[in-house]
Image (cartoon, helix red, strand yellow):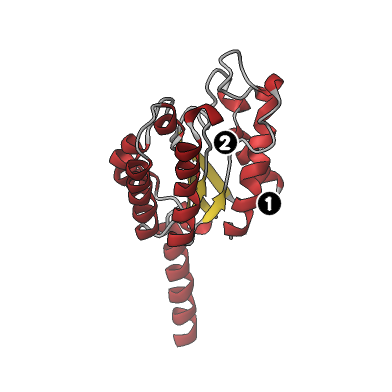
Amino acid sequence: MGRVILRRFLVTGLVSLIFCVPLAAWAGGTILVYGDSLSAAYGLPQDAGWASLLQARLEQDGKDYTVTNASISGETTSGGATRIAAALKQHKPGVVIVALGANDGLRGLPPDEMRANLATIVRASQRAGARVLLVGMRMPPNYGETYTRQFAQVYSGLAREYKTAFVPFLLQGMEQRRELFQSDDMHPTAAAQPILLENIWKALRPLLK
């Protein structure tokens, strides 16, 4: 009789434990895409953007993650730093893809300010227990050799300091292909989104459980 009671107790306890644990704890977790219009599928249907394609790639690869795209068109690193705490609290990501800075560069903002803002985002994400993938951007040559060099060095320097995964340039492989950009010559077309995804995927895959 004692063994039967013990067995029932253990089974009941296990069932209770299963139903008390949030579903996210059993899944791979959330990947938070934290960027600007380049990640927000600007000018495109949302399901055509690289973040949506990432969800499909994860499912195809058998990785149980949910992609949440918190990117905002026009976002700067300052805006990103301001809202990162709330985003982390809301989504509780296991991985954060930080893809900000393009709008800072287009406005000619000081690289040191951009660096401080990105560092705030990276530190907050790591403190929350998330693995970070930092995605770099580059400025065109007409911004001057000094500014473009300092701008690019912000990303590589942060990746080394905080030991994050790193994509040096989101638009790698597209620089000389005008047909991959929309009429504004800034935002990638739908045909370009798989290229962006591949650039991200190479660095992201090692971070996934």
Q: Residues within 10 Å of mark 2 (few under 14, many from 20)?
A: many
The numbered disc on residue 155 is none
In the rendered image, which quarter contains the C terminus?
bottom right
Q: Secondary structure at mark 1?
A: loop
The numbered disc on residue 51 is 2
Is residue 130 left or right of 197 when viewed as pictured? left
Q: Residue furthest bottom?
A: 2
Is there a contact, CB below 8 Å, between mark 1 and mark 2? Answer: no
Measured as percent of width and height from the top left, residue 131 is found at: 48, 57
Residue at 38% x, 41% y is: 111
Is residue 120 left or right of 60 when viewed as pictured? left
Depth check, mark 1 against mark 2: the one in front is 2
Rendered view: 189 above or below 16: above
Residue at 54% x, 56% y is: 165
Rendered view: 43 above or below 30: above
- Tell me the residue that label 1 is attached to: 62
Residue nearer the viewer, 100 or 43: 100
Residue at 66% x, 23% y is: 190
* Residue 200 in view: yes
Is residue 129 left or right of 45 when viewed as pictured? left
The number of discs equals: 2
Rendered view: 75 above or below 5: above
Q: Label 1 sits on what residue type?
A: Gly
Residue at 71% x, 45% y is: 60
In terms of image quadrants, where is residue 169? top right
